[in-house]
Image (cartoon, grey):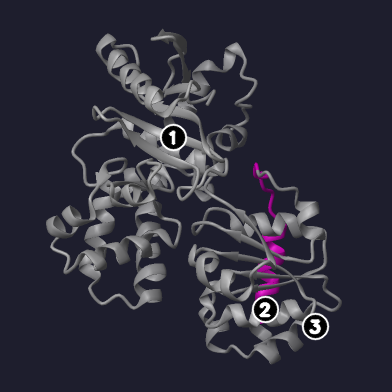
């Protein structure tokens, strides 16, 4: 066990020696570390959680355990590990537990450490950590930071451009980077290796499905699960009826389909967007839309004969809204009017609709403009909202329609 911990210390020190881009978060790392609560950094695999934790702790005295190690899990002895940590990291102030959800009954162990006064930073790739284990055993004892793959502004910064202050000479580079990000996404390890994206994300997608879903939940019918995952990634942004999905994919029951969809959300792979309705029962019965955490997965895995840049842009806007803290349970929805007109995103704040966001890749066509603006304005009337946006790839203007102002903005400004 000591050799495992010593090897992980060398791994930690090697990671700390690298240079990194500071991620854009709304949380101040200093304030976070000063809190006695458990610091929980969650998000999908390979999105930068461990790096964020290391950056928070750089310059501090901290011990490190990486539970993405089968050797550590196989040799696990909690009492022995804590004694060895004192030996390998004498006088440490913080304990970093990486991918801790891989350890059986981790929540009980972490709760015990918390009661003993250990100041912990934890990373994990499973949303269920919050919905059950964390919420049950550690209620009121943790603060959460969610890390997603790089956003567009971070992608620009990595490539030496400031998205918020582009100069005239930056236009060509900005267009190229915006198109690259739209198609290939923002996984950190691929920022300098764009030619490896499809192979890397194809493997990562399969790893998430098999390691975080099949293995964790002991799924026996792996064929149905994989077919569902492939259907979802190939139909991003399309309304999904669980009954139709069950029937079309030949899954044994509606409950199994619903269960598998929940499993695929847990590792932050897929998200589901409900149709907005003031009546909760009606909202729960309506079809939901599926989105994926990074556009690169669509390019790597989707079964499609043609590229749909409009849906890629819609998925990008959805993930950006997640980054801003919108929640698909409380503050982020889509909407369909009584006349079957649709708006892509309803942003809710407390008990009122704050803004409506429509996504359209190209607004240069008159017919397209009429359709998108008409849908947005009709939905705005039913939802009593005057804060209206259409996000495009590179169009910008203001449209007046039926006494309402529609702001058309490019994704770089959004």
x and y percentages locating residue 103 in the rendered image: 54, 79
- 84 left or right, relative to 160: right
Relative to 260, say whether 102 is above or below: below
Q: Which residue is mark 3?
A: 86
Mark 3 or mark 2, earlier in chain: 3
Residue 185 appears in the picture as rendered: no
Q: Nearer the viewer, residue 184 or 325?
A: 325
In what element is the residue under mark 2?
Answer: helix
Disc 3 vs disc 2: which is toward the camera? 2
Q: Tell me whether the residue at label 3 lies in contact with that at label 2, contact meaning CB atoms closer than 8 angstroms.
A: no
Q: Quadrant of residue 5?
A: bottom right
Disc 3 vs disc 1: which is toward the camera? 1
Per the rendered image, the range of residues in magenta is 5-24
- 116 left or right, relative to 269: right
Q: Residues within 10 Å of mark 2 (few under 14, many from 20)?
A: some
Q: Which residue is mark 1?
A: 346
Q: Which residue is mark 2?
A: 111
Mark 1 or mark 2, earlier in chain: 2
Relative to 72, say whether 200 is above or below: above
Q: Tell me whether the residue at label 1 lies in contact with that at label 2, contact meaning CB atoms closer than 8 angstroms.
A: no
Q: Which residue sits at x=48%, y=26%? A: 411
């Amino acid at each position: 066990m000591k050799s495992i911990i010593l090897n992980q210390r060398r791994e930690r020190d090697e990671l700390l020696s690298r240079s990194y881009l500071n991620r854009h978060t709304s949380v101040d790392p200093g304030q976070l570390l000063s809190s006695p609560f458990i610091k929980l950094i969650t998000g999908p695999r390979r999105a930068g959680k461990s790096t964020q934790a290391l950056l928070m702790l750089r310059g501090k005295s901290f011990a490190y355990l990486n539970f993405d190690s089968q050797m550590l899990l196989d040799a696990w002895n909690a009492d022995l590990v804590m004694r060895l940590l004192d030996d390998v990291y004498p006088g440490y102030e913080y304990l970093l537990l990486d991918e801790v959800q891989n350890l059986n009954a981790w929540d009980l162990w972490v709760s015990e450490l918390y009661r003993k006064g250990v100041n912990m930073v934890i990373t994990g790739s499973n949303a269920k950590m919050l919905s059950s284990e964390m919420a049950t055993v550690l209620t009121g004892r943790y603060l959460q930071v969610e890390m997603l793959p790089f956003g567009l502004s971070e992608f620009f910064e990595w490539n030496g451009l400031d998205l918020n202050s582009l100069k005239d000479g930056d236009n060509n580079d900005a267009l190229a980077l915006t198109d690259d990000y739209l198609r290939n996404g923002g996984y950190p390890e691929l920022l300098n290796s764009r030619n490896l994206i499809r192979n890397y994300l194809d493997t990562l997608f399969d790893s998430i499905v098999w390691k975080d879903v099949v293995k964790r939940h002991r799924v026996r019918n792996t064929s149905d699960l994989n077919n569902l995952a492939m259907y979802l990634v190939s139909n991003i942004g399309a309304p999904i009826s669980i009954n139709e999905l069950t029937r079309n994919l030949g899954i044994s029951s509606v409950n199994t389909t619903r269960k598998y969809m929940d499993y695929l959300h847990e590792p932050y792979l897929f998200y589901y967007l409900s149709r907005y309705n003031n009546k909760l029962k009606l909202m729960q019965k309506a079809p939901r839309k599926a989105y994926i955490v990074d556009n690169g997965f669509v390019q790597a895995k989707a079964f499609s004969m043609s590229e749909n840049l409009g849906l890629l842009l819609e998925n990008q806007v959805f993930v950006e809204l997640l980054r801003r803290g919108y929640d698909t349970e409380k503050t982020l929805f889509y909407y369909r009017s009584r006349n079957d007109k649709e708006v892509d995103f309803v942003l809710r704040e407390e008990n009122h609709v704050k803004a409506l966001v429509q996504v359209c890749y190209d607004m240069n066509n008159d017919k397209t403009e009429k359709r998108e603006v008409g849908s947005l304005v009709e939905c705005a009337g039913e939802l009593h909202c005057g804060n209206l946006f259409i996000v495009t790839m590179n169009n910008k203007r203001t449209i007046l329609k039926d006494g309402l102002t529609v702001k058309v903005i490019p994704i770089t400004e959004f």
